[in-house]
Amino acid sequence: MLLNPAIIALNSGSLLVTAFAFYALYTALRILTHWNIQSGSELQLLLEKKTYLISTVFSYVLGFELFSLVLFIFTAEHMHDLFVGAMCAAGSLNANDYGYVALVVKIITFMICGVWMIVNHTDNQAHDYPLIRPKYKLLILLTVMIALDTILQIKYFMGLRTDVITSCCGIIFSGESQSLTGSAASLPTTATMLVFYAALLLTLRVGFSVVITGRGAALYGLLAGATTIISLAAVISFISVYYYQLPTHHCPFCILQKDYSYIGYPLYLSLLLAGTTGMGTGVVESLKGPKSLAKVIPILRKRFCLISLAGFLIFALIASYPILFTDFVLNS
Amino acid sequence: MITLLKNLLSEMIWLERQRFFLDFTLSSLWRRKGRNLSLLVVYSLVTFLLSSVIFFTHALRKEAVIILKDGPEMIVQRTVGGRHSLIPVSYIEKIKLIRGVSSVNPRLWGYYFHPASRTNYTIMVPENFSQPDDTVETGAGVLRTWGPLTDGKLYIRAHDGEAIVLKPINTMGEGTDLVSSDLILMSETIFRKISGVPAGYATDLSVTIRNQRESATISTKITRDLPDTRPILKEDIIRTYSSLFDWRGGYVIVLLCGTVLAFFIFAWDRATGLSAEEKKEIGILKGIGWDTSDVLMMKFWEGVVISVSAFLLGVITAYIHIYVTSATLFQHALKGWSTLYPNFSLSPAIDPYQLAILFFLTVVPYTLLTIVPTWTVAVSDPDQVMRH
């Protein structure tokens, strides 16, 4: 195991957050079993007060998850010189079996947390807690994900041995690798580009119609989720390559480095924002049953859709910039 | 268009609301300055301690990597009975035969113990020493610690007891102090006289390699052809230093755990045990129409103000401590080289990464720990509070 300040910070923070998530889950389960909005009993009043606590805990947890995602990648990046053969975060994460799994679980946890916050925000707009049950059921999944994330992260850091020979990003993300990441790198560039831009245009088109006419929000939610995954594949397939201007280099982490002026951060953050709020738009639409939310939902749907569209636009601009404004041309 | 304007207006109202919250929070904090200042001082102190550790180990790690960058890709030592021993210069030809090796040079270096100052100095023959035999170039630390010079000359006792007089003619710049502080550069003849390294032998060999990726293969070939040698790769040294400084930093943070924990208990206690006056204030606020979420928002801003001030204060003082006063407080614990500590100022090297770690170690736990006490206050009923 490595004892480094960042690992101590990440592990202790994650343990603390998991403890809070379980405490909130315990409260949520009590709410699910004893909730009765008609009752004026002391227990019901206490439970109503507790909803504030859960909201507060999870709004902080959302912030924490985002920070921890960034710090996790930062740490993997920073540690690469401890492993023979590793040249960036890709190599450090590959140092044992848990690295990439932990990263993927972290991203998914952040997105679920974001969607939960959107549902919670929607629920808070009405005074009769219409979404209390679906909201707290989703909380069970979220808590499990947070716990899983913590376990995987600790397993990853505990399993690190500095003398392990790991592959560098040139091997994991090269076309010859048989893994999922390798397959993303060997996707035909022109076809991936076409699919990526088609998905993006379709998402934007549906998004604008959601904003203007209010129809198709559920479809938009699905499209936003799919476009996020396609975009990640596109980053490995050609967007990163255009930034490196090196046809064989498909690493999704090197763009986070100083050499590429940290361009990866706005790129990924805009995509995460767009994907989360986009899926949130679809989820909000599916919640329109309760009467007390009838007025609120169209407003929220529009707002989240606008945020998501802005995110996708920023992502598209950053992704397209080197394709349009550099001499580098990538032919498959 | 109209909806867009409406949206913009609602955003502006939201921003304005937050501004009022912040304004109110600041004046409320100021009203209880004594109480809040003590929290701020302790919070800053904890941040200062942790920042100092992180900045210092990071700067040392960086310094080591920079120094090693210019070093040879590989050093070949000879071992006898598992101990480092002098290497015959004839080995050079054998290593040169290995494909991929571009040059091999003998290195002559060693230590000289000066009894008067009770200090070990590093003596070394540079590749091109153009000065006369009876002169040396010294690092800044040498003349500082040597003691009084006779006629501006250094008297050195050679390995056979003979006294050798050398004139220091050049002092190496402060910029390279970390490596050159205890260094004395001399000609090969004088070196062999002082150290007793016989002709035909060198301390070790430095090997330059055309393609760095081949270094592992080349080192295997060297151990195969010359079984009594031990090749050391530059990347191995860098890796060792990196993990060493990382480990030291982590170790000190674990030691500081008690302090940090004590602070968090203090913060928790502070957030739980509100004064009667504060309770009354919240009761009145709720009485005049503040919502629970408004009180939570106010408390959120209170946390932000305290955390950000303490964080900035701690980080800035740690920056001064490490880069201006050269880490006076714990350089001995973390640096750990010879007894002759060079006087060096580290080149400032702070990146978002270290700030993120610090944020995680201080602000995140503080914020999480104050959630429950804050909530308890925020949901209290106004009549209950005011009745007391």
Image (cartoon, grey):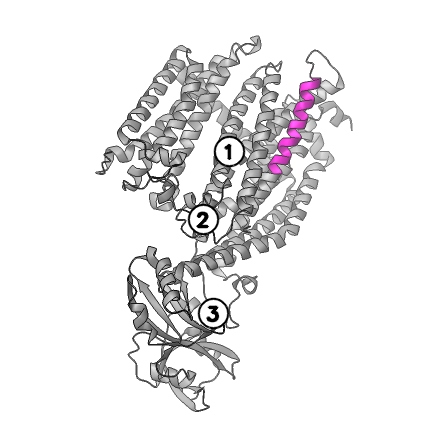
The magenta segment is: A16-35
Give the amino acid type for the residue marked by disc 2 in the picture: His
Find the distance from the CA under tag 2 to the CA under tag 1.
Answer: 21 Å
Give the amino acid type for the residue marked by disc 1 in the picture: Val
Which of labels 3 and 1 is toward the front? 1
Q: Is residue B168 above or below residue A271?
A: below
Task: List x then y, in percent, for residue A280.
Answer: 48, 21
Disc assigned to residue A105: 1
Q: Are marks 3 and 1 in contact (CB under 8 Å)?
A: no
Residue found at the very far left of the displayed protein: A327
Disc assigned to residue A78: 2
Task: List x then y, in percent, for residue B357.
Answer: 52, 46
Q: Is residue B315 left or right of residue B1?
A: right
Question: Is tag 2's residue or tag 1's residue first in the polypeptide sequence?
Answer: 2
Q: Are marks 3 and 2 in contact (CB under 8 Å)?
A: no
Which of labels 3 and 2 is toward the front? 2
Which residue is pictured at 54% across the width and 20% down the height? A119
Which of labels 2 and 1 is toward the front? 1
Give the amino acid type for the residue marked by disc 3 in the picture: Pro
Disc 3 target residue:
B342
Disc 1, SS: helix
State which quarter of the image contains the N terminus of chain B: top left
- Residue toward you, A225 or B205: B205
Which residue is pictured at 59% across the width and 36% down the height? B302
